[in-house]
Amino acid sequence: MNTQADGIKLRDRPGRGLDKFEEWWADRYEFLKEKGYMLRPRYRPGWKPSYKRLQNPFTFEDGHYLTNKRIIDALRISDSTMVAIKRVRNITGEDGVTATSQEEDICALFSTIQHASQPSNHSIPLLEVLCVPGFEDERLLVMPWMREPENPPFRTVGEGLQFIKEMLEGIQYMHHNNVAHRDCSINNMVMDAKKMYPDGHHPSEPSRTYDYKKRARHFSRTLVPPRYYLIDFGFSRKYESSQERSPEYAILSGGTEPPECKAEAPCDPFATDVFLVGNMIRRRFLDGDPKFEHSGTHGFEFLRPLVNDMIQDDTEKRPQMDEVLSRFSNIIQSLSQWKLRSRAVKKDEFFFMKPFRGLDHLFWTCAMIARGRPAIPSSTPAQKS
């Protein structure tokens, strides 16, 4: 699950106890346990740090603190599934009437049986909604815990393309149901990697097991395909199909300000979604993003014409998501199997390592072909080729 700080300036706190946001969660320990969710040892009654003051707390399981005041991880007691529990505030209108938040409404909408069974629906499932005693203006949304989509890095061009495809599908599906995400940057894209990591992983240090005692064993995406999801619908909007879609002011998303922000005028929110997804592809796969120390990846330049159209300054010139998916599918069909299986090389990779990693990748690719694994790994059987 995305753990980017929510308005909090993160700081090193070696040897320190819980901050006020963590204390709020620790005070809900018994309540969550009654509801079937177990918090980590750090948030249990009577917790004392297992590390000494001069030791590095991050080398200990209970030394990892929350970096997002609104989200905590927990284990579902019934089956040990790791979940994310998110605090959301209800909406109180001018008439004093309280209604559920837009985020809860949209998350619940796409979690209904009608939508949950659709392969193109990539909105994160809502497992349960909890009402917090003493906090009538808040709800706790329980969702599956996810990993960052690029952790571990994509191994092949085909693996990267499957991620892009599922995110384009997810936005298209929302648009088909008259919903604009409005904040679909890489920060709000995640990966369900439970099958990739059969022994689980730690929520704060994904390379470690949940108990923090060893490195987490995992498989490649090509061997065990994950599924990708969109999260965080706090800025999303649902529109009535019978009415004309109202324009919206664009917002800063993932450190990127869409061109329409500078115009300081409302515009079609669907066009802003197209820009944000296109900009994600540009920053993560084509040009890189020095601000976030991301170099970009070799091998995806064939997406440049489509991305350039998606990120045009003029919102009316951007293609709609149906056209984006159609063009993207045609591009993929034009690529050879060897291209799809080629190694996704980071642009800042140390040149001395390239020959060795290239040779290793050749043997690995032969093994994947022998096992009948498709070049574009999909978790949806109907999408496999």
Image (cartoon, grey):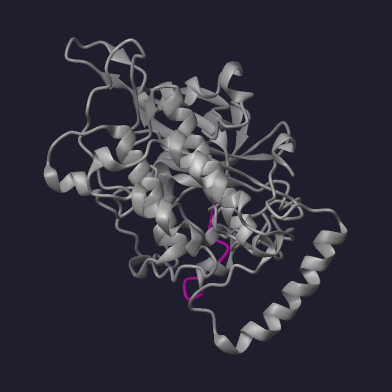
Q: Position of residue 94 (x, y in %)?
A: 17, 14
Residue extending furthest toward the right: 370
- Kindly identify the residue that appears in the image at 40 percent across and 53 percent down: 307
**Could one spot residue 235 in this view of the protein?**
no
- Left of 243 or right of it: where is 48? right
Give 196 or 169, whichever is nearer the viewer: 169
Residue extending furthest toward the bottom: 352
- Left of 100 or right of it: where is 227? right
Magenta: main secondary structure equals loop
Verify whether residue 104 appears in magenta. no
Q: Position of residue 222 (x, y in %)?
A: 72, 55
**Is 371 drawn above or below residue 23 in the view shown?**
below
- Kindly identify the residue that appears in the image at 45 percent across and 61 percent down: 284
Give 378 or 66, whichever is nearer the viewer: 378
| Magenta stretch bounds | 47-55
Verify whether residue 48 appears in magenta. yes
Give 157 or 240, whichever is nearer the viewer: 157
Count how many numbered circles sit on residues in the image: 0
Q: Position of residue 381 (x, y in %)?
A: 75, 37
**Could one spot residue 61 in this view of the protein?**
yes
Image quarter (top left, top right, bottom left or bottom right) of the C terminus: top right
- Left of 294 or right of it: where is 92? left
Q: Position of residue 190 (x, y in %)?
A: 53, 46
Give 180 or 111, whichever is nearer the viewer: 180
